[in-house]
Amino acid sequence: MQQRGEKGLWVLAIGISAVAGFAIAGFPGIRSQDVDSLPTTTVARSGASATSSTSTSTPSTSTTSTTSTPETTIPAAAPIVIVKSPQELTVRVGNGTRTSGAAAKVSEQLAAQGYTTRTPTDAKVNDVAATTVYYRGPHQAEAEVLANAIGLSAMDVLPITDPSPIEPDGAELIVIVGTNQAG
């Protein structure tokens, strides 16, 4: 009985070795010219649509069929940012120039766009060349939207520094008006 069991183990070991050998060698029974005739499926994604095509070719003939699939959106690797609406944000505008009323003018413009504004004030300095939008905490995206609303770019958006250019008075966003928007 024991010989029969040992023989079964040997057969099993040889079978496993053979399968492993075929796997490592790439199944040598398939010649390279045969590999070209195996069906392949390619899925190409460009933009938001996906196309799938299947081809089979032999050394003498080739057939291809293409099927379009419905539009597919592939999620981005970046985290999803939820931007608050202007009505959910509070903004305080500071005048960084010597032009009287510059902060009030920008504050009125923002209020007309739905932002909740605090009383405009003078900045700690009055020689600011370029208007800058500052944000507190996680409000960078909202600051960029606000900057765009007053004709600025994302390059004009910075986190609030310590000390702040003006007292925020509870505002999530601060705008310091520079001479480029004071007129």
Image (tube, rainbow, N blue to C red):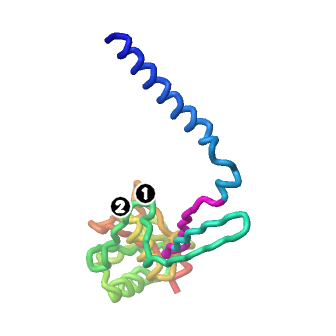
12 horizontally vs 37: left or right: left
Residue that protrudes farthest toward the right in the picture: 60
Region of the chain picked out in magenta, as a range: 37-50
Instruction: Let me know if residue 127 appears in the view.
Output: no
**Which-is-in-front pick, marks 2 and 1?**
2
Residue 154 is situated, as x and y percent measured from the top left of the image, at 51, 70
Instruction: Name the disc covering residue 161, or none.
Output: 1
Q: Quadrant of residue 83?
A: bottom left
Return the residue at label 2: 138
Give the answer, above or below, for where 163 lies relative to 86.
above
Q: Closer to the N terminus: mark 2 or mark 1?
A: 2
Instruction: Give the class, few, some or many, for how many residues have Cα within 10 Å of label 2's Cα (few <14, many ≥20).
Output: few
The residue lying at 55 percent from left, 38 percent from top is 23
Query: Where's the N terminus, which quadrant?
Result: top left
Q: Amino acid at mark 2?
A: Pro
Give the answer, above or below, for where 45 lies relative to 183.
above
Element assignment for label 1: loop
Residue 28 is situated, as x and y percent measured from the top left of the image, at 64, 41
Instruction: Let me know if residue 177 appears in the view.
Output: yes
143 horizontally vs 42: left or right: left
The residue lying at 45 percent from left, 23 percent from top is 11
Q: Amino acid at mark 1?
A: Thr
57 horizontally vs 166: left or right: right
Residue 174 is situated, as x and y percent measured from the top left of the image, at 38, 70
Residue that protrudes farthest toward the bottom in the picture: 112
Mark 2 to mark 1: distance in Å?
14 Å
- Between 134 and 33, the one nearer to me in the picture: 33
Q: Quadrant of residue 5?
A: top left
The residue lying at 53 percent from left, 31 percent from top is 18
Is residue 35 inside the magenta stretch?
A: no
Is residue 41 inside the magenta stretch?
A: yes
